[in-house]
Image (cartoon, helix red, strand yellow):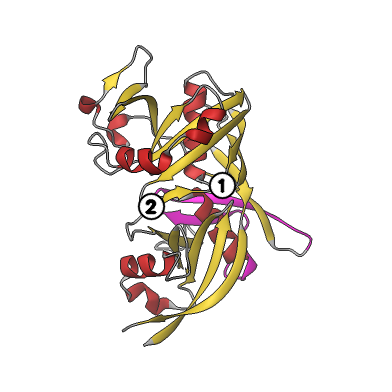
């Protein structure tokens, strides 16, 4: 048995167990799906929405670090907006790299992250260039043959038992379904604990789906609740917040710049051009460090 050092971090309550593979390269040979489920268990483990391994990049000429992200159920995630801000904070605060903007390699591609420092020269906020949203259903992927289109381009009816949701689909490297509700009060009674798993595994979504319900208070302000694929209910979803703003702009509900209110706090999202990238700004926090035994 050997001991592995970990760091608990979060972005707006979306929490992660982070492992520094620069210092502990042998962790890359561990059974990471099994490790993720054990570490993220909120009763028998550290607790978290996912496991993030911070690694050297595969191409050091193009990226400074690499993020390897697994959900709490052990499945691998293509991208995590709150998680990548945590990676940037860890890397700069612990002196692994000094570049700012920092280039982080993800399964989504290489993302540039500009960090804002506090009075103690620690990362307080980070702005991430999340790249251009993907709107082609085949690339998200969504099986349109199992859905019914509405009269509005890009909108589909998703049936779930006795419910029929009008949704838009966006990929930020990972797939998102966005449903707008008429009033913010509807978010309080929404039974995502029941609805979320059924929609995540809907037959129209071959790779499962992140599910978000949103309500716009104005053209520059929106509230949302999330059921994340492989993690369940979370306090925040960064890629989901980007998807909500994209869906809101396309549906005529939101302006290209909006504040997104999540249970864990706020994100500032900007989609300056319909053919351009979207940026996300929000905080990242280091909570504590600890040791975890690994069986060889």
Horizontally, residue 267 falls left or right of residue 77, namely right
Quarter the C terminus occupies: bottom left
From this viewpoint, which residue is outermost toward the left?
Answer: 145
* Along the viewing direction, whichever of 182 and 4 lies nearer the viewer: 182
Quarter the N terminus occupies: bottom left
Marks 2 and 1 sit apart, C-alpha to C-alpha, by 15 Å
Residue 38, position in %: x, y? 38, 69
Crowding at dot 2, Cα within 10 Å, few <14 / some 14-19 / many 20+, comes out as: some
Proximity of marks 2 and 1: CB atoms separated by less than 8 Å? no
Picture disc at residue 107: 2
Q: Is residue 218 above or below residue 5?
A: above
Residue 250, position in %: x, y? 47, 22
Magenta residue span: 93-119
Horizontally, residue 102 falls left or right of residue 232, namely right
Indicate whether residue 108 is drawn in magenta: yes
Q: Is residue 63 above or below residue 160?
A: below
Residue 166, position in %: x, y? 38, 23
Kindly identify which residue carries mark 1: 128
- Is residue 274 visible in the rendered structure shown here? no
Indicate whether residue 85 is drawn in magenta: no
Residue 53, position in %: x, y? 44, 66
From this viewpoint, which residue is outermost toward the right?
Answer: 119
Horizontally, residue 237 falls left or right of residue 170, namely right
Could you tell me which secondary element the residue under label 1 belongs to? strand
Q: Residue at x 47, y 26 (%)?
A: 180
Q: Residue at x 50, y 55 (%)?
A: 83
Q: Residue at x 40, y 48 (%)?
A: 108
Question: Which picture quadrant has residue 45?
Answer: bottom left
* Along the viewing direction, whichever of 234 and 285 lies nearer the viewer: 234
Question: Which picture quadrant has residue 88?
Answer: bottom right
């Amino acid at each position: 048995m050997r001991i592995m050092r970990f760091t608990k971090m979060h972005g707006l309550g979306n929490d992660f167990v982070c492992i520094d593979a620069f210092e502990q390269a042998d962790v890359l040979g561990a059974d990471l799906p099994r490790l993720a489920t054990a570490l993220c268990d909120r009763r028998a483990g550290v607790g978290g929405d996912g496991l993030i391994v911070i690694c050297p990049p595969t191409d050091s000429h193009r990226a400074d670090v690499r993020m390897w992200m697994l959900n709490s159920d052990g499945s691998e995630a293509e991208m995590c907006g709150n998680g990548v801000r945590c990676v940037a904070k860890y890397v700069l605060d612990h002196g692994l790299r000094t570049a700012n903007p920092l280039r982080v390699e993800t399964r989504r591609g290489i993302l540039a992250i500009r960090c804002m420092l506090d009075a103690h020269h620690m990362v307080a906020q980070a702005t991430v260039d999340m790249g251009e949203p993907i709107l082609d259903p085949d690339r998200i992927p969504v099986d349109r043959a199992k859905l019914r289109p509405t009269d509005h381009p890009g909108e589909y009816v998703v049936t779930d038992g006795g419910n029929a949701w009008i949704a838009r689909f966006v990929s930020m490297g990972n797939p998102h379904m966005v449903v707008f509700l008429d009033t913010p009060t509807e978010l309080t009674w929404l039974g995502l604990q029941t609805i979320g798993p059924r929609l995540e595994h809907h037959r129209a979504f071959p790779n499962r789906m992140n599910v978000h319900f949103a309500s716009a208070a104005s053209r520059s302000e929106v509230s949302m609740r999330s059921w994340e694929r492989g993690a369940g209910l979370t306090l925040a979803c960064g890629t989901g917040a980007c998807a909500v703003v994209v869906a809101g702009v396309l549906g005529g509900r939101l302006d290209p710049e909006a504040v997104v209110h999540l249970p864990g706090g706020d994100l500032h999202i900007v989609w300056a051009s319909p053919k351009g990238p979207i940026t996300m700004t929000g905080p990242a926090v280091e909570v504590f460090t600890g040791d975890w035994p690994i069986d060889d």
